[in-house]
Every structure is written in C-alpha cells, then in structure tokens.
Image (tube, helix red, strand yellow):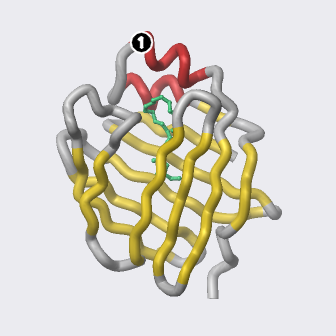
Amino acid sequence: MPVSLCGTWDMISNVNFEGYMIALISPYLRKIALRLKLRKVIEQRGDQYIIKTVSAFRNYTISFRVGQEFVEYTQGLDNRHVKSVQSLVTWEGNKLVCEQIGEKKNRGWTHWVEDDKLHLELHCEGEICKQV
Ligand code: YOG
C-alpha cells in the first residue's frame, strides 16, 4: 500500500510556478499567484479523494475516485471562460498521477510523499513546476 497523502500540508518550496502558469493565465494573475503560500488539504473518504488547494486569494477543490474519469472545471484557475478538462487519477507505484485532457497539451500533476513531505509536480505544455 502506498503511503497516505492525507493531511494538511503547507508549502515550503515552489520552483518554476511562473513557467507553469504562463501556459494558463495572464501576467496579472500570475503576479498575484506567485506570492501565495499554498496549503494542500487532502482527505480520503472510502475510495473518494478530496484535494483542496487553499490560499489567501482563492481556493480550489477537486474530488475524484482513483481510476474513474471525471470532468474538472478549473474555476478560479484558468477560467476566463468556463474551462474544463477530462481528468483521470491513477496510482503509479507510490505516486498519485493525474492526466488532464483538454485544450492544453501535456497537462497533469503527480503527488507523492517523500521524507515526510508532500511533493507535487505540475506540468503543462513542456513546463514543469515542482512544489514541496
Ligand atoms: O492541484 O492542480 O494538488 O487540484 C495551482 C494554480 C491562484 C490564482 C493550484 C489560485 C495554477 C490562479 C492548483 C491559487 C495556476 C492561478 C489557489 C494546482 C493557475 C491559476 C487555488 C492543482 C492539484 C494537485 C489538485
């Protein structure tokens, strides 16, 4: 069994968030987003996961079942118009991997726990952001 990702995790590092966001949002929003200390709250109820990204500016929540496709409305993220991606989360070894199929190429993320820290790699169109 993989290590549980559940808990409340406060950001300690955020590398190339700017690069990742360039593919998604305006320079104005990027400037705001770059200053944020993000918090992840991850809960599991049965086979359902809830991942909340919490900040002083906006919050963003997704919930899903591993292995079951779902439509993700990226409200509060890249939502100048209502945008959605078809998402699928699966376990790859110890890593929880999400593929987000939509307008943007090669979009997704990977979560795992290493050294008691929650790691997140976000990728979109060739840019990779690494958050701990
Ligand atoms: O997380 O997909 O944990 O959903 C990254 C924002 C800032 C303003 C957060 C709002 C990407 C808008 C979600 C920040 C930049 C910035 C707080 C990353 C786009 C818009 C919500 C993510 C996954 C994995 C779960």
Q: Secondary structure at mark 1?
A: helix
Horizontal side of residue 62 vs 130, given as left or right: left
Q: Is residue 45 above or below residue 26?
A: below
Horizontal side of residue 89 vs 60, given as left or right: left
Total numbered circles: 1
Q: Residue furthest right?
A: 115
Rendered location of residue 33, percent (x, y): 54, 24
Residue at disc 1, CB closer than 8 Å to ligand 1:
no
Q: Amino acid at mark 1?
A: Pro
Name which quarter of the figure residue 63 lies in: bottom left
Rendered location of residue 62, percent (x, y): 43, 57
Rendered location of residue 16, percent (x, y): 56, 29
Few, some or many C-alpha atoms within 10 Å of disc 1 (few <14, some 14-19, many ≥20)? few
In the rendered image, which quarter contains the N terminus?
bottom right
Q: Is residue 62 above or below residue 121?
A: below
Horizontal side of residue 126 vs 51, given as left or right: left
* Residue placed under numbered mark 1 in the picture: 27
Name which quarter of the figure residue 57 lies in: top right
Q: Residue at x 58, y 75 (%)?
A: 44
Q: Residue at x 48, y 39 (%)?
A: 128
Q: Residue at x 42, y 34 (%)?
A: 127
Q: Residue furthest top?
A: 28
Q: Residue at x 21, y 37 (%)?
A: 82
Name which quarter of the figure residue 35 lies in: top right
Q: Nearer the viewer, residue 131 or 26?
A: 26
Rendered location of residue 18, percent (x, y): 51, 23
